[in-house]
Amino acid sequence: MSTILEGMEDRPFIPTEYVVRLARTPWERAGYHALRREVFCSEQHVFAEDDRDAIDEVAIPIIAACCMAGMPDRIVGAVRIHEAEPGVWRGSRLAVHADHRKLGRIGAELIRMAVSTAHGLGATRFLAQVQEQNVLFFRRLHWKSLGVITLHGLPHHDMEADLSRYPAHGLDQTWLLRPQPRIRQVA
């Protein structure tokens, strides 16, 4: 019996479902800011101690949370959106916890929720300044580069979402189920 459990303690817990939604509660907002600090300060060293700025005063925070028994349990993804000028919305501070990046869909679902929410709020354009290593990922999600810029000493692209690929909605949450492993078929 003990041989079955050997090595189990080294395997990370993988939740069966995630929720992507507008951050509504104090613990969601606290987790949202903690994740951003972890990714942009501790991991990437883009900011020294905190990544908050004046945009946080007007931004709409969006989170991805892993669920336990159908209830959000831990914040594992974050992004914020704000209206920079009438009709022009921006997304920024996209972050996914390192343990949950291999899922692959969390970042894409956060982007989809951000752009579709802004579209539902009247966006005629949606822009983001994307780190160089993430440009291909955004292109696959129907974004185009408007040019290369340098932010915080790092190469970024000004990018624009193709709003025709992001239907406007007024939803405050969506569910993201964990993909099931593929079953190999033997011929």
Image (spheres, rainbow, N blue to C red):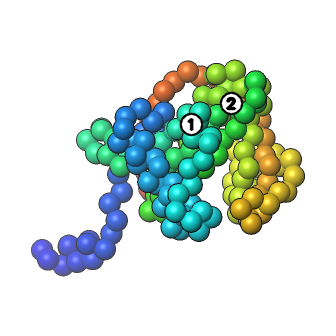
Q: Is residue 1 visible to us here?
A: yes
Residue at image point 52% right, 47% down = 78
Residue type, numbered disc 2 = Glu
Q: Residue furthest right?
A: 147
Label 1 vs 2, first from the N-terminus: 1
Q: Do the residues labelled 1 and 2 touch (CB within 8 Å)?
A: no
Q: Which of 126 and 14 is in front in this view?
A: 126
Residue at image point 72% right, 45% down = 128
Residue carrying label 2: 83
Q: How crowded is mark 2: few (under 14 residues within 10 Å), some or many (20 or more)?
A: many
Q: Which residue lies furthest to the front in this view?
A: 54
Q: Residues within 10 Å of mark 1 (few under 14, many from 20)?
A: few
Which SS class for mark 1?
helix
Relative to residue 1, is residue 59 drawn left or right? Answer: right
Residue at image point 44% right, 62% down = 99
Residue carrying label 1: 57
Residue type, numbered disc 1 = Glu
Q: Residue furthest left?
A: 1
Give percent across and percent down for residue 79. Answer: 56, 44
Relative to residue 72, is residue 35 drawn left or right? Answer: right
Give percent across and percent down for residue 19. Answer: 42, 39
Where the N terminus falls, by quadrant? Answer: bottom left
Which SS class for mark 2?
strand
Q: Nearer the viewer, residue 156 or 83?
A: 83
- The answer to which image quadrant residue 109 occupies is top right
Relative to residue 44, is residue 87 drawn left or right? Answer: right
Q: Give me the disc on residue 137.
A: none
Q: Nearer the viewer, residue 146 or 2?
A: 146
Tell me: residue 169, above or below residue 46. above
